[in-house]
Amino acid sequence: MTLPAGRARFGLLFIAGMISSLGFAPWNLWPLTLIGLAWLIRDTATTETARQAAKAGWVFGFGHFLLGTHWIAQAFQYQQDMPAWTGWVGVVLLSAYLAVFPTMTVAAARRFGAGLPLVLGFAGCWTIAEALRGVLFSGFPWNPLGAVALPMAGLGQGAALVGALGLSAVIVLAAGGLYLLERQWRTGAVILGLTAAAALAGLIPLRTPTQLTPTRLNIVQADIGQDEKWSEDGVERAVVKYLKLSPAPTRAARLLIWPEAAIPDLLDEMPAMRRRLGAHLGSNDLMLLGALKAIREDDGTAIAARNSLFVLDSEGGILARYDKKRLVPFGEFLPARTLLNAIGLDRLAPGALDFWPGPGPRTLPLPSGFPAVGPLICYEVIFDGRVTEAGYRPAWLLNVSNDAWFAGAGAEMHLAQARLRSIEEGLPMARSTPTGISAVIDAHGRVTASMPRGQAGVIDARLPEANPPTLFSHTGRILPLLLAALLALLGWRLGRTR
């Protein structure tokens, strides 16, 4: 079949990019992802010039990321100095930038020819480009293609071996299998059969019920939106609401968890507030909550802030603190602040001070017999391979986040990526957000308890057990990148021998 030319061709590529995003949460229509990618691979096989290839990859990528990041537009609704429509401008500009990575993929993959060499080369090139997307300009690895594997039976369990990045290569190979059914149907059938076999094999560990530890979690979701949070009396209103929802202590020790910036103030400089919070704890309870910390000059002048997780005891004492490493541009700091302030742009979050990053992943030991925790604040959870402290593996992960910024689809996507981190590391995770989706996730990525978006309440659950360290937890991104390089080299070799 001859592919359309001109505007019709690029219109179909844009549509293919859009439908390829429907495999992500909350839609989980993974067959559409395979079909969209298969169309792009098929188009690449017929592309005659590098310029055409670059344009095709960009148009597809623009459609792909436009749908996948549309939720960002909602964040601009909370910035008084900018009209809401600027959110959609931001989505378009971000999508235009992210589309560069599929552009790179298609431009490189067209050199592999057609058929199986192209499929192998395309899988390798896409994976390498996706890895670059996670590191360039501070990185934005939102919605790795591997997240599409989560609803595909047990295929997502492969993240324990090759990570989400390696699963991205598998998804591209499966899409390539569809493409090959037209010209090399036996080869295409073999690829699709192997993908199905891997998905079925992944169901084996999922047959085992989730094993729970004695550690009791109370995760409070107060359904406090951004407009309420940053109001004049927002701190007091938030504290009252969180305390009202927090269960009273019992004889059984528990971890009381509030989300990112639950108290949008300098908690370490508020001893009375800490004592007030501690009074709601039993003698062996601990409280883990998000708040802010100021960085001051010797004369006391505040020059920056930190987005932090605090661990408090029943006396209101600070037992530990974790400072967020990966900050959100325009949300937590303003690049080129002097210039952008001059033209009327400001951070989405109120405040004159930028946030400074913390030192990186840490494992926090907890007293009273509680297992050591690896904290992740907000979108730190989307960065694969960099979530635990080297040489000190925690027993569980805690992702406190402010998903009030997100539209509903964004919150679902965020949860899916948190599930991937649990599978990759073989660690359970607790998630606490003010508006949802709060959840408890076991070490196989299964959600064992959750509270939907837009609901106030508390999750009373026990922490699942950890799995033994996974292969990916030992190798990180090295193994999936080696896999990508092997696929590309194999495709190149096959293409040269034909």
Image (cartoon, rainbow, N blue to C red):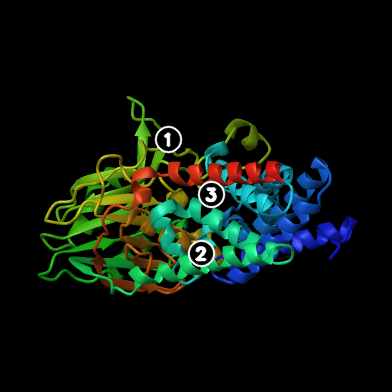
Q: Are marks 1 and 3 in contact (CB under 8 Å)?
A: no
Q: Which residue is mark 1?
A: 304
492 and 369: which is toward the camera: 492
Residue 62: x and y in percent read 71, 53
Residue 474: x and y in percent read 34, 45
SS of the residue under disc 3: loop
Indicate which disc, 1 or 3, sits on the residue closer to the N terminus: 3
Residue 84 picture quarter? bottom right
282 and 279: which is toward the camera: 282
SS of the residue under disc 1: strand
Residue neighbourhood size for the residue with mark 2, other residues' Cα within 10 Å, grouped as few (<14), some (14–19), many (≥20): many
Q: Quadrant of the N terminus?
A: bottom right
Q: Residue at x 50, y 40 (%)?
A: 352
Residue neighbourhood size for the residue with mark 1, other residues' Cα within 10 Å, grouped as few (<14), some (14–19), many (≥20): some
Q: Which residue is mark 3?
A: 141
Image side of residue 327 versus residue 488, left or right: left
SS of the residue under disc 2: helix
Q: How far apart are the alpha carbons under marks 3 and 2?
A: 16 Å
Indicate which disc, 2 or 1, sits on the residue closer to the N terminus: 2
Q: Amino acid at mark 3?
A: Pro
Q: Amino acid at mark 1?
A: Ala
Q: Are marks 3 and 2 in contact (CB under 8 Å)?
A: no
**Residue lying farthest to the front in this orientation:** 497
**Residue lying farthest to the right in this orientation:** 6
Indicate which disc, 3 or 2, sits on the residue closer to the N terminus: 3
Residue neighbourhood size for the residue with mark 3, other residues' Cα within 10 Å, grouped as few (<14), some (14–19), many (≥20): many
Residue 317: x and y in percent read 18, 48
Q: Which residue is mark 2?
A: 149
Q: Residue at x 38, y 56 (%)?
A: 160
Q: Amino acid at mark 2?
A: Ala
